[in-house]
Each structure stands twice: as C-alpha cells, then as structure tokens.
Amino acid sequence: MLTVLAVTSTTIANAQIVINGGYEEVEVSKDQLAPVDRIAGSQIMPAKNIIGAPICPSINSLNMVDLGYDKVLVDWTSSLNFDSILFRFSVSGSLTSRIISIPGSPNPERYFIRGLLSQTTYDIEISTKCGIIYSAWSAPITVTTLIEPGPKFSANAITNTEHNVKLVPNPADLFTKIKFNTNSDDSNVEIKVSTQAGRIIYSQSVITRLGLNEIPLDVSTFAPGIYFVSVTNERVTAVEKLVVY
C-alpha cells in the first residue's frame, strides 16, 4: 500500500538533509512544499514531528603551535567532546594521505602528529566522529618540518658548551642577536630566516671570528609570528626558533 505523508506544521527550521553521504542544514516552510495529491486507495498520515538526521559538530579552526624535524604540534578551538578526533595529512601536492584517530573524550584540544619527514611540507586537516557519523574535514593548514639535526659542531665549525645557537632577546620586536661560538677565525657561515611555511625571508653570509660571535638581526619589519633562524657552515646546520611580537 502506498503511503503519502502530509506535513501539517507551518514551519520546519534547520532540518538536516542527507546529501551524498554528508549533511546539509536547510530551512523549509509549509508554503515551499508541493501540494500532496491523494491517490485512490492511499492513506494520508499527518506528521506531528519531523526528526532530522544526526550530525557531528565540525572543528573549523586548526592551528600549528610548534614543530620539529619529524613532528608538529597542532591545536584547535572546540572544547566539545567526541567519540574520536581524526587527522588527515599528506605531503603537499601528493594524492596519497594518511589518517590517524585519537580519542575525543575528553577533548585534548592539542596533539603532536609524529613520524613526519624532515624538511617536508605537509597539508593537515581535522575531522570528528560521533557514533557512526563523521564531520566534514576542516580547511587544511600547511606546515614545513625543520632540518633533521646533524652531528654536533666541532673544530672549524660552530660550537659552544650546549652546541646550540642562541637568540637574545627571544621573543623580540625590533632586534635580536644571533650568538654562537667558533673554534677558528675566518669561517664562512650562512644565516637564514624562514617562515613556518619554509619561505626564506632573510639570508646573510658572515665571516666568523674565534670565540663568541654575535650577529645582530633586525626583525622590525617582520610580521608577528614564529620564524626559524638557521646557521650553516660547510657541513652542518643549527636551527633556533624565533618569536616576533
């Protein structure tokens, strides 16, 4: 027997409609519905309540907080709890992606994605799962991992007791100094500053002196954000994160 449902309510607001496996929120009013013609032998059953298909809230904003040569720390704005939170990431331009899932209750609001390749640009998205329902993927963020640490600097290279380049002050708003030690005179060192996306915005070659070297760096024209300062000799590179405010 054919059954036709007639909608008797005046307005249906924000109904959830299934479209191609996803969900779309629409507003439908009575005057937008086509008239229902009764067919001989059919029944008209008034519908008192219309229940839309369930949805899982999306996380719309994914942010990069910190990164290393093989991992990136991301956070997001939603504090809601979910059954699962999923991350999809791929090398930029690649058609192959990887998806990982973590528990979403309680919502950790940040997560380290590990196992990345050094000096590689990735596109990362986030989604949620509630029961068997998945939300849409967020807009991707693009990050570039750092250079993998090489051997420690030794004779005729950059070195100090901690084997690190220092930036003082850091954070900085106008100027900072790049500090490092060398064990010889007249070593050629390349200094570069790059953005989180890997774009080089500053480059300078300097001749070092024996002992402590302090190279001034003008950051007054840099937009506020996170940058990476690399100091490279003929064999190895040291990288330090710089925050400009």
Image (spheres, rainbow, N blue to C red):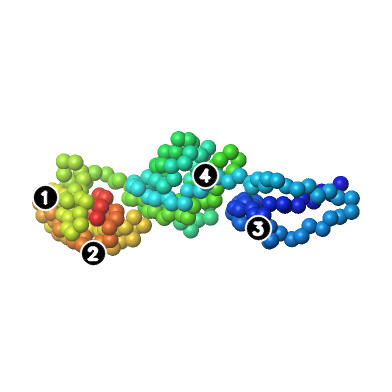
Badge 4 amino acid: Thr
Q: Indicate the position of residue 26 as horizontal and vertical percent values.
A: 61, 56
**Mark 1 element type:** strand
Q: Which residue corresponds to mark 3? A: 29
Marks 2 and 1, how far apart at CA: 27 Å
Q: Position of residue 221 (x, y in %)?
A: 23, 64
Mark 3: secondary structure:
strand
Q: Earlier in the sequence, mark 3 or mark 1?
A: 3
Residue type marked 3: Ser
Q: Residues within 10 Å of mark 4 (few under 14, many from 20)?
A: many
What amino acid type should be assigned to the residue bearing mark 2?
Thr
**Circle on res. 128:** 4
Mark 2 is surrounded, within 10 Å at the Cα level, by few (under 14), some (14 to 19) or many (20 or more) other residues, namely few
Nearer-N-terminus badge (3/2) = 3
Q: Which mark is residue 212?
A: 1
In this rendering, position of residue 37 left or right of residue 225: right
What residue is drawn where x is 22% and y is 51%? Answer: 171
Answer with mark 4 or mark 2, whichever residue precedes in sequence.
Answer: 4
Q: Residues within 10 Å of mark 1 (few under 14, many from 20)?
A: some
Is residue 204 or residue 158 the one in the foreground? 204
Q: Which residue is mark 2?
A: 221
Tell us which disc is closer to us: 3 or 1.
3
Q: In this picture, is 153 found above or below 31? A: above
| C-alpha separation, residue under disc 3 versus residue under disc 4 | 31 Å
